[in-house]
């Protein structure tokens, strides 16, 4: 598993083809080993070297592997001359700033797509403190770096020249910016009559817009360092990004959107808001290189097929009820599938057997299925990762038993956590701290205390919201609520400091939801949510 405290392509030139067989028999990775992996984007090979293979880290059991990305990219397997010329990849793109892509990889097992070439003395000897996953065939640093260096030379010059600059200037009325700003959000864009003023930010990489902006797409076309776009409340029924190949990630409010055209190099599309029942997404090769995150309505009753018959990766969160058979019928080429309930029910899980290419499956906080719905081992020959969390206990026990042998014979990364006994869902459906039950980072006692505090506070809040004097008394009541919650969790955390990033975010979300519910019920109370959340931040010690 990655460190829980950590945060998150070039255009295809030749069609991807299946990787050839390894040039030698499988072997355990050793320091100095050089491997290549074929790009799913271009069909070219990228090279890597194992720098360390041993037992040095408490984070992962067994052998630890440190992997270094190399600067070689080739159309065929490397020759001896290629091997002699290989050097560590110098990453200059985006935030890298002339650094190595050097990490301890998790899980410590070679992917099947890695092809052993030769063993040479390690190109570096130092150790790494970075952790991460194995590079996927569609996310290889050497090709990303080559693509970055091919961008507009003048923009790259200005980007590099502004590194570390502390220069401040007035970019718009009431808005002070620095040369190093990489993001432009609604608070800035709303002040700009002309987006060309953004050119004063030489390191701008991300734009987040809110509301209609007729000039936005035209601006994106001519600024090839931008890689991420977020656009909320755009008010359009059709959007076309086909001629903006440098944008790698798009997050869109899908409310009212019926037709969406994507460029061939887009890797990640996240849809939010209310999906139109006839939304249609047009992507290169049916979405074979696309990662889609979407609300559950994409597969709901009354929603037409959105397209994407070759979709590679699908993530759906916040599920109440989902029929997996619909997903499988519309996206039969899925390779990665991640489904998370709030919690929710998953119907027809057995349909997963009809996804022959699946290599990663993740189910979280989902119920309504039995051990008989789990396909037997061997059904999915490419399965490399199976993660199940907060699922029925009988299913968890069954998967652990029948899939355990594949951990050795097929290098399966298997994780089964938080099995739930019958009745658990009914007891915890309204408990926002339910994820703490069974967490390796939260003790059972703290999970129970948090759930009890929520139940008590929520009941008291509802009674206060129903009182005749609620509009007058709510501001003072909510301030007292914030003070009580911070004092309580400060006391619980004082001895062992168990509240970390994920726990803190959960607590903050629960408090904010209390405030939102009160403001929605009684607008006349003029509840100042930003001031109360700021008070929460000031008072908390965790």
Image: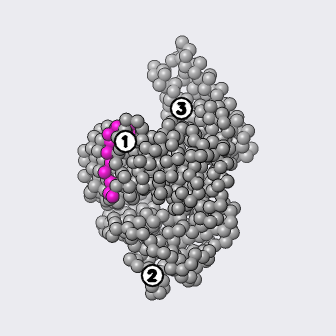
- Does residue 168 appear to the left or right of 398 in the view shown? left
Reading the image, the residue beneath label 1 is 253
Reading the image, the residue beneath label 3 is 513
Q: Which residue does the image show at 48% across and 64% down from the upper left?
A: 136
Q: Is residue 259 part of the magenta span, yes or no?
A: no
Residue contact at pointers 1 and 3, CB within 8 angstroms: no
Q: Which residue does the image show at 47% across and 80% down from the upper left?
A: 86
Residue situated in front as seen by the camera: 119 or 24: 24
Disc 2 element: loop
Q: Does residue 279 sit above or below 247 in this rendering?
A: above
Residue situated in front as seen by the camera: 58 or 421: 421
State how far apart marks 2 and 3 are (Cα): 56 Å
- Does residue 235 appear to the left or right of 168 in the view shown? left
Where residue 417 sits in the image (x, y, percent)? 64, 48
State how far apart marks 2 and 1 are (Cα): 45 Å
Look at the image and give the residue range highlighted in magenta: 272-285
Please tell me whether mark 2 or mark 1 is closer to you in this view. Answer: 2
- Residue count near mark 1 (Cα–Cα under 10 Å), binned few <14, some 14–19, many ≥20: many
Disc 1 element: strand
Reading the image, the residue beneath label 2 is 78
Q: Does residue 72 sit above or below 375 in this rendering?
A: below
Q: Which residue does the image show at 60% across and 76% down from the upper left?
A: 27
Q: Is residue 277 part of the magenta span, yes or no?
A: yes
- Residue count near mark 3 (Cα–Cα under 10 Å), binned few <14, some 14–19, many ≥20: few
Please tell me whether mark 1 or mark 3 is closer to you in this view. Answer: 1
Q: Could you say which quadrant of the image residue 468 lies in?
A: top right
């Amino acid at each position: 598993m990655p460190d829980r405290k950590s945060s998150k392509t070039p255009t295809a030139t030749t069609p991807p083809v299946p990787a050839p067989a390894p040039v030698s028999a499988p072997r355990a990775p050793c320091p100095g080993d050089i491997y290549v992996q074929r790009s799913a984007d271009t069909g070219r090979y990228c090279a890597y070297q194992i720098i360390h293979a041993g037992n040095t880290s408490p984070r992962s059991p067994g052998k630890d592997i440190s992997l270094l990305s190399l600067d070689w990219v080739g159309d065929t397997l490397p020759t001896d001359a290629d091997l002699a010329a290989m050097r560590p990849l110098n990453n200059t793109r985006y935030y890298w700033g002339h650094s190595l892509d050097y990490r301890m990889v998790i899980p410590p097992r070679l992917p099947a797509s890695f092809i052993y070439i030769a063993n040479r003395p390690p190109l570096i000897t130092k150790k790494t403190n970075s952790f991460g996953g194995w590079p996927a065939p569609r996310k290889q640093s050497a090709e990303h770096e080559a693509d970055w260096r091919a961008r507009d030379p003048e923009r790259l010059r200005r980007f590099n020249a502004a590194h570390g600059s502390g220069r401040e200037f007035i970019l718009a009325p009431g808005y002070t910016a620095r040369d190093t700003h990489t993001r432009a959000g609604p608070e800035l864009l709303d002040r700009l009559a002309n987006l060309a003023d953004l050119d004063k930010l030489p390191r701008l990489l991300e734009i987040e817009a809110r509301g209609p902006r007729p000039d936005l797409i035209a601006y994106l076309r001519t600024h090839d360092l931008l890689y991420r776009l977020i656009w909320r409340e755009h008010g359009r029924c059709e959007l076309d990004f086909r001629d903006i190949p440098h944008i790698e990630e798009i997050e869109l409010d899908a409310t009212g959107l019926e037709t969406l055209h994507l460029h061939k190099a887009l890797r990640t599309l996240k849809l939010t808001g209310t999906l139109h029942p006839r939304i249609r997404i047009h992507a290169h090769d049916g979405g074979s290189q696309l990662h889609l995150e979407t609300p559950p309505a994409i597969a709901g009753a009354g929603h037409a097929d959105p397209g994407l018959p070759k979709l590679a990766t699908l993530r759906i969160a916040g599920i109440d009820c989902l029929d997996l058979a619909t997903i499988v019928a519309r996206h039969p080429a899925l390779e990665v599938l991640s489904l998370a309930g709030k919690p929710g029910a998953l119907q027809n899980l057995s349909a997963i057997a009809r996804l022959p290419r699946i290599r990663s499956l993740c189910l979280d906080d989902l119920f309504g299925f039995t051990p008989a719905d789990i396909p037997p081992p061997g059904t999915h020959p490419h399965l490399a990762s199976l993660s199940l969390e907060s699922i029925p206990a009988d299913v968890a026990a069954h998967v652990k038993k029948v899939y355990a042998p594949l951990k050795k014979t097929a290098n399966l990364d298997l994780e089964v956590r938080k099995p739930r006994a019958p009745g658990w869902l009914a007891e915890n459906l309204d408990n926002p701290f339910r994820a703490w039950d069974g967490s390796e980072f939260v003790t059972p006692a703290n999970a129970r205390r948090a759930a009890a505090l929520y139940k008590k506070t929520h009941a008291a809040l509802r009674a206060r919201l129903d009182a005749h004097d609620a509009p007058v008394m709510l501001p003072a009541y909510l301030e007292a609520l914030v003070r009580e919650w911070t004092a309580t969790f400060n006391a619980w955390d004082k001895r062992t400091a168990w509240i970390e990033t994920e726990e803190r975010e959960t607590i903050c979300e629960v408090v904010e939801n209390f405030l939102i519910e009160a403001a929605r019920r009684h607008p006349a109370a003029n509840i100042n949510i930003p001031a109360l959340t700021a008070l929460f931040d000031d008072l908390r010690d965790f």
